[in-house]
Amino acid sequence: MFARSLRTATRVSRVANARAFSATAGRMNDYPTVEKGQSLWNFTEEENMLRDSVKKFADEVIQPRVREMDEKEIMDPELIQGLFDNGLMGIEIPEEYGGAGCSFTSAIIAVEEISRVDPSVAVLVDVHNTLVNTVVRHHGSDAIKEKWLPGLAQEKVGSFCLTEPGAGSDAFGLQTTAKLDPSGDFYVLNGTKMWISNSGEAETFLVFANVDPSKGYKGITCFAVSKDMGVEIMKKEEKLGIRASSTCVLNFDDIKVPKENIVGEVGKGYKIAIQILNEGRIGIAAQMIGLAQGAFERALPYTYQRKQFGKAVGDFQGMGFQFADIHTQIEAAKLMTYNAARLKEEGREFTKEAAMAKYFASVVAQRAAGSAIEWCGGVGFTRDTGIEKYWRDSKIGAIYEGTSNIQLETIAKFLKKQYA
């Protein structure tokens, strides 16, 4: 494990010994530090340092565990602790609460670099940072922040609990309720959630429940709930891909939640969910571009080693054109993702851009991963190379945090508003 945490690394970036994090040789792209630039390849010194340190962690700590975690369908507890120790679970959390205090783009970069090695670990980091931590930071009271953020930054995995058996794409059709006790001191939480990422490892849950079903979605409220309050982890789904990432059914049976645990305001949970899912889609886009890059990097060297008809497979023009096409698509998806992240940071409208990035990146990830298997032939089809895992992992990108059809519907609405 790396002794230096991300929080320490960000401080180092502000002093003369920033060269402690040197750029890794052999990268497909050079990411120069630009103080003021118009290019989308405009990363701060701090963000470049983070990319290098996360890449090192992913290659040296995550990579050796990938196949075993996938086979056993479980996240290595030591790896999770390593993520905390290196500050990767509190990227945007202010330093006063034990976090790294970095930018939103920094979180996106971390998700991308981790996904290049294992998308399962990336989604754990993504959900924890871009959904759970962000909701608490932006909508929690000072008391909520003081109570929950230090744990989320340093030791407790967070889970975002919105989806239900009857509330998927229609997220506001949820049936989970939270009824105020006659004493007025606490709410009684009852209901079931499903497809909940990170739920197998989580100690902290953000649960969306309706305090007044008669008001429809305007009764939806967000609650911070700890596992020891009585959260039941039910069925763990057996999935096609991202198998080390836990996805479980949760049950809440008469759980007493203090009214002080409301995140935001009563009845404002639907606004929180809409806002945070827009941000979360950029995180999924980052996961998908990292996955695509990982599959690409894993496959290409083999094509230049494998010889057929007297020359390397990769030297055939038909193959070279395919490489160029996929590489171009990956780069386009990256630019869309970085653009959406920067728009969000600048406080500008980014909903359409996030939807486009998430949709396109998920398409590219499937194309890149599928092509990588074909480029390597029979070897690519085996589990020994790890390439087939990228293809299995890529499919979820078109499903969670808004299906591809939901993204297209969102984009279409913006187009109608602009042109109708």
Image (cartoon, rainbow, N blue to C red):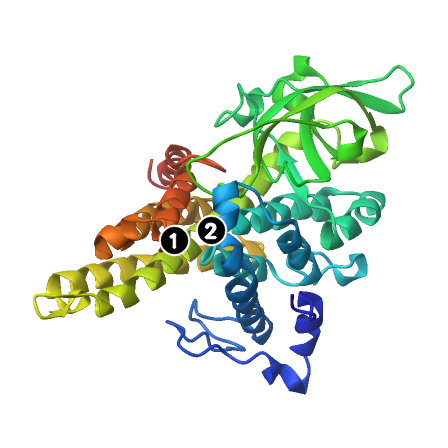
350 or 308, which is in the foreground?
308
Q: Residue furthest top?
A: 214
N-term mark: 1 or 2 = 2
Residue 303 coordinates in the image, percent (x, y): 23, 64
Residue 68 appears in the rendering: yes
Residue 50 coordinates in the image, percent (x, y): 58, 69
Q: Residue at x 53, y 62 (%)?
A: 58
Q: Secondary structure at mark 2?
A: helix
Q: Residue furthest right?
A: 183
Horizontal arrangement in the rendering, residue 61 relative to residue 359 (left or right): right
Residue kind at label 1, given as amino acid type? Gly
Residue beneath disc 2 = 67
Q: Quadrant of residue 15?
A: bottom right
Distance of label 1 from label 2 (alpha carbons): 7 Å
Q: Secondary structure at mark 1?
A: loop
Residue 92 appears in the rendering: no
Residue kind at label 2, given as amino acid type? Arg
The reply to whether callout 1 and callout 2 are in contact (CB within 8 Å) is: yes
Q: Where does the N terminus fall, quadrant-wise?
A: bottom right
Residue 152 coordinates in the image, percent (x, y): 73, 49
Residue 386, numbered label: 1
Q: Residue furthest left?
A: 309
Q: Quadrant of residue 276?
A: top right
Vertical relation: 281 (above or below) 64: above
Question: Crowding at label 1, few (<14), some or many (≥20) Cα neighbours within 10 Å?
Answer: many
Residue 10 coordinates in the image, percent (x, y): 67, 71
